[in-house]
Image: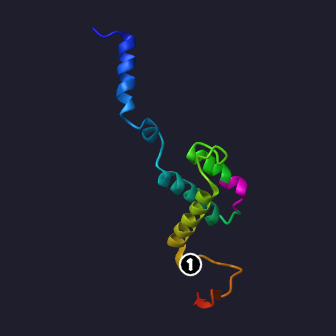
Amino acid sequence: MVNARQLNLLDAQQLAIFDVQAILTRPYEVNLFAVAQRITTQLLSRHKIHANHLRTWMNQEFNGTDADGVWNWKDAYEAQEVALVMLLKLKGKTYPFTGFSEELRINGTEIRG
């Protein structure tokens, strides 16, 4: 018969063959997409996105801080890029880009809206 101490040891040995941390944490892409959804919501409601908002959302979704090395600001910028793609996918040409001219110049190339 196996006693409680041996059972706990067996459980620990069995868990050692799995990457428990990977099982308990969400994948990077899921966290990034969750932040991007929050950013998109802010953009759709025409609110500004402050660094403090972004930091809070990243901390919440990644379950840690940038100071702890859980995420970095490059990840936050990536979430902003994903949010912009989501916004353009949702609104496309119907999104009123007020303040922009009909013609934009990017690296000398003319883009017409």
Question: Is residue 9 covered in magenta?
Answer: no
**Quadrant of the image containing the N terminus:** top left
Q: Nearer the viewer, residue 94 or 88?
A: 88
In this rendering, would 106 be left or right of 10?
Answer: right
Would you place residue 98 above or below residue 74 in this image?
A: below
Q: Is residue 57 above or below residue 2?
A: below
Which secondary structure, mark 1? Answer: helix
Can I make out residue 26 in this image? yes
Q: Position of residue 31 (x, y in %)?
A: 52, 51
In the image, 43 versus 60, the foreground residue is 60
Name of the residue lying farthest toward the left = 1
Q: Residue at x 72, y 59 (%)?
A: 50
Looking at the rendered structure, the kind of residue marked 1 is Thr
Relative to 1, does residue 52 appear above or below in the rendering? below
Tell how many labels: 1
According to the image, label 1 marks what residue? 94
Specify the quadrant of the image occupied by residue 84. bottom right
Please report the bounds of the magenta region as a residue range.
49-54
Question: Is residue 32 shown above or below 110?
Answer: above
Q: Nearer the viewer, residue 58 or 87?
A: 58
Q: Residue at x 55, y 68 (%)?
A: 87
Residue at the spot 60% in from the left edge and 45% down from the top edge: 60
